Amino acid sequence: MPTSLPVKAGTSDTEQVRATARRRGTLLIVDDEEGARQSLRVIFKDDYNLLMASDGAQAVELVQKNRIDVAVLDIRMSGMSGIDVLERLKYVDPAIEVVMMTAFETTDTMRQALRLRACDYINKPFDLGTMRSAVANAMQRRTLESEIHNNAEQLQELITELQNQKIEEQIANTRGEIYASIIHDINGPLTVISGFIQLMNQRFGNATRLETEDLEFLKDRLKIITRQVTNCIEISRRYLSFLRRQPDEVPRVGVNQLFADLTHLIKVHPSLQHNDFAIEPLGEDIGVRVNGTDLIQILLNLTVNAFQCTAQRHRVNIKGCALHEALDLTAFKDGPETRFLNVERFINIAPLLQVSVCDNGPGIPTEILPKIFQPYFTTKGARQGTGLGLNIVQRLVKEAKGALHLQTRVGEGTTFTLYLPAARLMR
Ligand SMILES: Nc1ncnc2c1ncn2[C@@H]1O[C@H](COP(=O)(O)OP(=O)(O)OP(=O)(O)O)[C@@H](O)[C@H]1O
Ligand SMILES: [Mg+2]
């Protein structure tokens, strides 16, 4: 029987043991000889909180019920052997430090004990100093290990907290960017709407009656305005549904129909001015798995940039084709006159849609090329450009798992080529 605390200590006893353990460490002495237990008790009673067990089963039970830092364990006991007890103690509490007391054990037994992570062994009969320092070392080791463990836990908590904060921050940033993008994208249709309303005001502001041809004119313009209003609603709906993380069902849209819609938009866009513009339908129509508004938005941003690149009269062309082979990506390298975006997430599987927006404007100087996709980078006056257009293009291309290639030469012009995963159109 144990000679110290009762094995089945009540809750309050156990709590008391735990509280004391926090202050001065708890030592468990496991030996089936009463004499040995008593002498160890005398040695350690002033230094540690002591628990005694006279066999393996009691020892295991005590470790289950108490936080024990170090056990001094006799290797040779009747019943469960010291090696078995060691294994079970380590199973119940892997962090417990165990000092084995040995007599004439074989090296094999010793090796086994060390393999089971006993921290030290002392020959019986032991001398006082050796025993004291073995237990003190084991206690120190245990304290250090639990400190390391606590620190690691705290560090992990800190890392998780930081990561959460970073995610929150990213969400806040994305939210801001998305609101800015809505305003940017809606600005195009709004400009068209406001232009038409001004025109109608000029023509009919003072009219007292309308002729038939005036009515035709009005109906026609109202149709365009309605389309632009629908566009605004579509743009904000798409961005807001992205914010709510409900990606729209992505329908398969025919590219030639999108080209026709784009042509309507560009024809009435103020930046067209006196420039030459041509859009060539695909010889073989194909479908793309992107939101139609997204593709129009990408091409519109690129085309408006192409119009705005110089005040001189110049040419802007849009043309495309279906590719029936994947791209050879080794041919696309970033350089002083080229950029290739989203190579990591591009689904390079045929069929692909290839559309290029090409201008013979001034080109993009090497020194600003790395910056043009950054949000708010613009070379236009503050009242003319927000610098968001290409950033939006980049985001939409990524979302569609497409890629964007840019080739430019100062004095000759710029071509943006868009690649998107495509699919045959159902007839
Ligand atoms: N086709 C092009 N030719 C020459 N420079 C271009 C061309 N396209 C883009 N750029 C350069 O890239 C910059 C960034 O374009 P982006 O569309 O992001 O913003 P922005 O056109 O300046 O402003 P916003 O799109 O808000 O009107 C432009 O200011 C311009 O300097
Ligand atoms: Mg732009």
Image (cartoon, rainbow, N blue to C red):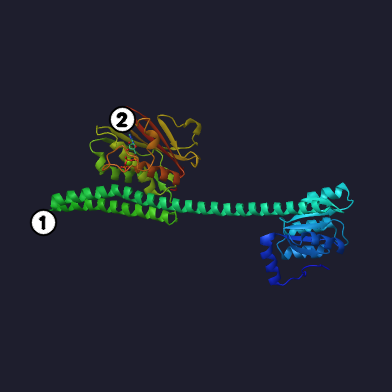
Q: Amino acid at mark 2?
A: Pro
Residue 388 x/y as whole percent: 35, 44
Residue 309 x/y as whole percent: 29, 35
For mark 2, what is the residue?
362
| Residue found at the very far top of the displayed protein | 411
Label 2 crowding class (10 Å Cα cut-off): few <14, some 14-19, many 20+?
some
For mark 1, what is the residue?
209
Identify the mark nearer the N-term, 2 or 1: 1
| Residue found at the very far right of the displayed protein | 104
User: In front: 113, or 104?
Assistant: 104
Q: Residue at x 74, y 53 (%)?
A: 136
Judged by depth in the image, the label closer to the viewer, 2 or 1, is 2
Q: Residue at x 85, y 56 (%)?
A: 75
Image position of 130 (left or right of 165): right
As helix, strand or loop, the secondary structure at mark 1 comes to: loop
Image position of 358 (left or right of 147): left
Report the number of discs. 2
Q: Residue at x 24, y 42 (%)?
A: 270
Check if mark 2's residue and mark 1's residue have beta carbons within 8 Å: no
Specify the quarter for ligand 1.
Answer: top left
Ligand 1: does it lie within 8 Å of the C-beta at label 2?
yes
Label 1 crowding class (10 Å Cα cut-off): few <14, some 14-19, many 20+?
few
As helix, strand or loop, the secondary structure at mark 2 comes to: loop
Image position of 289 (left or right of 148): left
Residue 234: mark: none
